[in-house]
Image: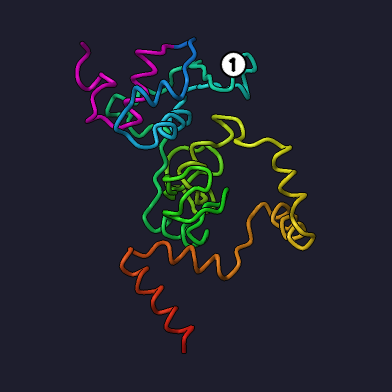
Amino acid sequence: MAAADQDWRNGALGTRVRVALWLRDEVRVGNTFSKAALRAAITGAEQVDRRMRDLRPAGWVIRTNLDKPSLRPEQLYLEKIGAPVWERKHRGAGLRQISAKTRRDVYARDQYLCRRCGIGAAEAYPDEPGSTARLTLGRMSPGGTGSAVDAEELRTLCARCDESTEDTVGARVGLAEVWRQVEALPDHLQRELLGWMAADARVMTPVERAWGLYRQLPAGQRDATQQSLRDLLKS
């Protein structure tokens, strides 16, 4: 058995380190694996897929079917092991720090709503009953090392959208399905959507902005706000 600080089964290690060790010891360079296998191995940890992506700026080369066509959509290929992040002096390799202020600024700028699907914090996913959204921050591009991350490099995403970015898996929906939804919109909403497409950003209405902020309140304060609004509308 490997030493505890070199064993991917050691839950006391950081998730990125555990993922790196699992790839090194179980997958090995030149072999394929799946995200499902990775998640099954690294249990009890959050955002396993994202921690795997965090290895790329540290020199790890993990291919998908988008850049290695011989792979199936669910397969990934470990082409190269980069910095040995399990060693203490390399733990921060490739990582860039997000300050608390930057985190707050990005969430506020994005109105506490996912920039990709528009869902708010703790809202239920319409297609996943019982599953609610948790907001996180995603980088606009995976590159960059050292120093702090600027707000301009970040966007608010729900954890589901962050884990399904294009560099790891294919799109969740097909073109035909999207176009059916677009065609079904009335003209004025199609024009509004076209504006969003041109700006590559969803333009929030005042109601949506208020909703995003409201969802950040603790449950008790949400109840109080709801009651205050009822009282206001009665007056």
**Quadrant position of the N terminus in the picture:** top left
41 to the left or right of 6: right
In this rendered view, identify the residue nearer to me: 75 or 148: 75
| Residue 109 spot, x, y in % from top left | 51, 61
Q: Residue, x 53% and y 66% (percent of image)?
A: 209
Q: Residue furthest right?
A: 187
In this rendered view, identify the residue nearer to me: 80 or 7: 7
Residue type, mark 1 in image: Leu
What colouring method underlies this structural image? rainbow
223 to the left or right of 56: left
Q: Secondary structure at mark 1?
A: loop
Decide: is 223 above or below 29.
below
Residue 118 located within the stretch drawn in magenta:
no
| Residue 57 spot, x, y in % from top left | 47, 31
| Residue 42 spot, x, y in % from top left | 33, 26
Q: Which residues are the magenta region?
A: 1-28
Decide: is 92 above or below 155.
above
Q: Residue, x 45% and y 65% (percent of image)?
A: 213
In this rendered view, identify the residue nearer to me: 65 or 78: 65
Q: What residue sits right under mark 1 in the picture? A: 71
Q: Residue, x 48% and y 51% (percent of image)?
A: 150
Q: Residue, x 38% and y 52% (percent of image)?
A: 99
| Residue 127 spot, x, y in % from top left | 53, 43
Quarter of the image for residue 228 reads: bottom left
